[in-house]
Amino acid sequence: MGFLSNKVDRSQLQPGDHIYSYRKRKSYAHHGILVEPDRVIHYTAARGFGSYSSVSAGKQRKKKNRCENCGHDPNVEGGVIKTCIDCFLKGHDLYKYQYGVSLAHFLYKNAGTCTTKQSDPVDIVISRATELLNNQGFGEYDLFENNCECFATFCKTHKPISWQAYAVTITMIVLVGITIL
Ligand SMILES: [Zn+2]
């Protein structure tokens, strides 16, 4: 993993890592927490994670089969789910979200790829994700206010972060900078 890219090989991952992958030509990213070598807990819109495979725009598409590896059924499952890495990636590249980066690094990188906040210890991160999976306790999915990035950053830091929060942070940094100058 270099300075410019968070792209990783799955052999480089450790349980407790916050991973993500881009969808639809990088228009958005899907985020999750690796809890076992090949299991990811992630937050999806109700049925939305697999809805591309069901009914779309009035067209009946062929239903996708339940995953033989992890048992995930993309036709019915939504909310906080636990799947294998393949079901999480859906054929897209794998990236690792970075924690505890310097402010310079954070400002240089794209929003939604890193944070200056430190991650909590691995066992706490995994137990938070597992608890949210067991209790389905992350509320209503909202693309902007309560999304998969909020879920993963909440597991890592106990505070949800999304790109909107970054926008606010950057605005504040710029305003403070202007004030100081
Ligand atoms: Zn699977």
Image (cartoon, rainbow, N blue to C red):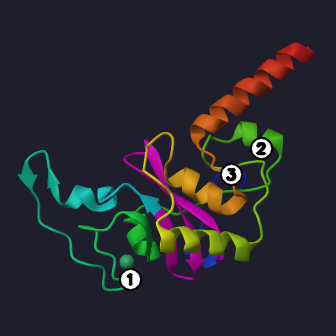
Residue marked by disc 3:
159
Figure quadrant of residue 158: bottom right
Query: Would you place residue 83 above or below residue 157 in this image?
Result: below
Range of residues picked out in magenta? 14-42
Which mark's residue is nearer the viewer, 2 or 1? 1
- As drawn, is 50 to the left or to the right of 12? left
Residue at 78 percent of width and 48 percent of height: 116
- As drawn, is 82 to the left or to the right of 10? left
Which mark's residue is nearer the viewer, 2 or 3? 3
Q: Name which residue type carries label 2.
A: His
Residue at 68 percent of width and 42 percent of height: 109
Does residue 24 show up magenta in the picture?
A: yes
The secondary element bearing badge 2 is classed as helix
- As drawn, is 90 to the left or to the right of 26? left
- Measuring from the top left, give residue 41's x and y in whole percent: 51, 70
The secondary element bearing badge 3 is classed as loop
